Image: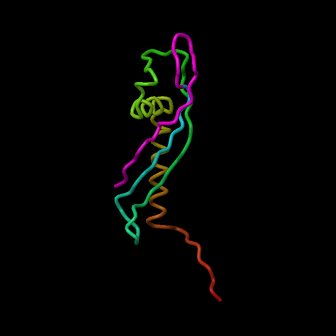
Amino acid sequence: MTTINWNCKTVDVYPAEGEYTDVVYNVHWIVTGTSDQVDAEGNPYTGRVIGTEMLDTSTIVDFVPFADLTNEIAVQWTKDAMGPEKVAEIEANIQSQIDALITPTSVTMTISV
């Protein structure tokens, strides 16, 4: 089983947007997957995808002041902006990375002579 973790703690903000301050408009995300399977040294297999997602600030409905912003809220905004297909694609990519580490289809070897 793989545990997926979304980190959306780094954001770009507009210092002022209409009546609001520190309005998040871009989220820098890191999605990490950690397998419950471990390698020969006891380390879990991991995969990671990094990117950014622009948020639509043109129609702010429930503004969250920056001081009250949490990773969980930023993750939800990011996933909502991406849509379920892109979220699933990112998480599947991470699982593919881990699967390739557990069962490689290609390895690099060095000739010793």
Which residue appears at 47% of the width and 45% of the height?
31
Q: Out of 83 and 67, give the one closest to the viewer.
A: 67
Residue 105, horizontal then vertical, whole percent = 52, 67
- Residue 91 at x, y = what percent? 45, 46
Examine the image and state in which quarter residue 44 appears: bottom left
Give the magenta part as a residue range: 1-24
Image quadrant holding the C terminus, namely bottom right
Q: Is residue 42 above or below residue 26?
A: below
Residue at image point 49% right, 16% down: 60
Please provide percent x and percent y for residue 15. 57, 20
Residue 77 vertical placement versus 85 (above, below): above
Depth check: 87 or 21 in front? 21
| Corner quadrant of residue 62 | top left
Magenta-highlighted stretch: main secondary structure? strand
Where does residue 32 sit, x and y in percent of width and height? 45, 49
**Residue closer to the observer: 87 or 17:** 17
User: What's the residue at 42%, 60% (across, down)?
Assistant: 45
- Which quadrant holds residue 69? top left
In the picture as drawn, the residue positioned furthest to the bottom comes out as 113
Q: Quadrant of the N terminus?
A: bottom left
What residue is rendered at 47% in x and 36% in y? 9
Magenta segment: does it hold 10? yes
